[in-house]
Amino acid sequence: MSAAYDLPEGREIGRVVGDAPGPTLIVVAGIHGNEHAGLSAVRRALATLTRRQGRVMGELVAFAGNLGAMRLGIRYRERDMNRVWTNERIADLEARARSGEALDAEDHEQLELLAAIRAAIARARGPVYLIDLHTTSAHGLPFILFGDTLKQRKFASVIPLPLLMGLEEALDGVLTAYFTQQGCATFAVEGGQHDDPGSVDNLEAVVLLGAESAGLFGSGLLTETGAAHALLDRRRGDLPRVMEVVSRHAITADDAFVMEPGFLNLARARAGQLLARTRHGEVRAPKDGMVILPLYQGQGADGFFWGREMSSTRMRVSEVLRHMKLDRFLHLLPGIARDPEQPSRLVVEERVTQVYRHDMFHILGYRRVRKQSTRITFERPATIDHTAE
Ligand SMILES: [Zn+2]
């Protein structure tokens, strides 16, 4: 498959730098090489801001994610470039590069992208924001996902698409999570189907509103943002503004999992509704809620995610609790310890997870849930900016 769009010549797609200092917004397009809508979208946004350069404070800079795969029109060559952003892997990659070991295609891509983003962070004249642009193979509604910190909620909340919390935390090694940890406010956006021209419009609108939210220009100063807001508000339809993942329906090949037809990527479900069938029987909705990213094609370990709408009251409650830093006391409860190596991680004995509902951890931002033998760990996004939350 060859690409029918203008490929970027190099890692940097373009940049607009205002005379006045201000925030930096980094946009990554095509970290999955077959997702080219983000490239067209960010070029349009760059053109808009270039015309208004006199009003821009700070910098907007866009990078190609997986340049080699973009040139081939494929998702990736050796490995998924959005699963490689862990401290361990980056340290290992840099050590291998220093020792002159042979590196594969995505190793080179990652080192170059990492260097480009670090340089943008180093020259920043204000806070740094990052948006990662994606599209999906199946038709579906656009949505935004991010690690649940208050700073990131604030950054994303001006965009009237569904905001999905707790999904990024279900994945390991994603770009946005790594740069959250480096002190940036980030989110990723799924803009729609790969080849739908509407996906370019959606992602362009997200970049413009993201730039406004970051403070690259005064709120309401660009007429284009009004239209961007109206477009995304229409796209959301009757979906809730904010949703959270409650649990992951993990599957194995052995389960013979078959999703019931008819669910979009985000879909409401009624209590008792049939969601899927497995060789063990039917899977029904435990209560009214949301089916998130149902598995229809290919293989995977996630049948679907189960979620629910997050009311504005619940949002405010969790904000207040976090401002009170209530999570500082969690490790005083029986069966809960704080990981000495990683203070943003709680280690909970499995026998007490029936007593403390997962909800208690989620509301405090501890949404990364992992099982380790008889323990379950709950982790919130760590960040080097310890004053942020
Ligand atoms: Zn993608």
Image: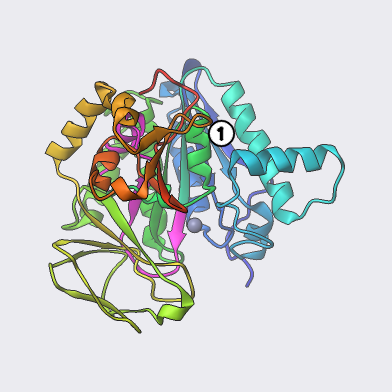
Image-based side of 13 in relation to 147, left or right: right
Image-based side of 113 in relation to 200, left or right: right
Image-based side of 22 in relation to 6, left or right: left
Q: Residue at x 19, y 46 (%)?
A: 310
Q: In this picture, is 21 found above or below 245?
A: above
Q: Residue furthest right?
A: 100
Q: Residue at x 47, y 18 (%)?
A: 126
Q: Position of residue 46 (x, y in %)?
A: 49, 38
Q: Position of residue 302 (x, y in %)?
A: 41, 65
| Residue pointed to by mark 1 | 15
Q: In this picture, is 213 found above or below 198?
A: above
Q: In this picture, is 264 found above or below 357?
A: below
Magenta includes 378?
A: no
Task: Name the amino acid, label 1.
Answer: Arg
Quadrant showing the N terminus: bottom right
Magenta includes 160?
A: yes
Q: Position of residue 47 (x, y in %)?
A: 48, 39
Task: Please report the bounds of the magenta region as a residue range.
Answer: 134-161
Evaluate whether residue 113 shows in this view: no
Q: Depth check: 207 or 79 in front?
A: 79
Q: Residue at x 64, y 28 (%)?
A: 119
Quadrant showing the C terminus: top left
Q: Depth check: 201 or 178 in front?
A: 178
Dot 1 crowding, Cα within 10 Å, few <14, some 14–19, many 20+: many
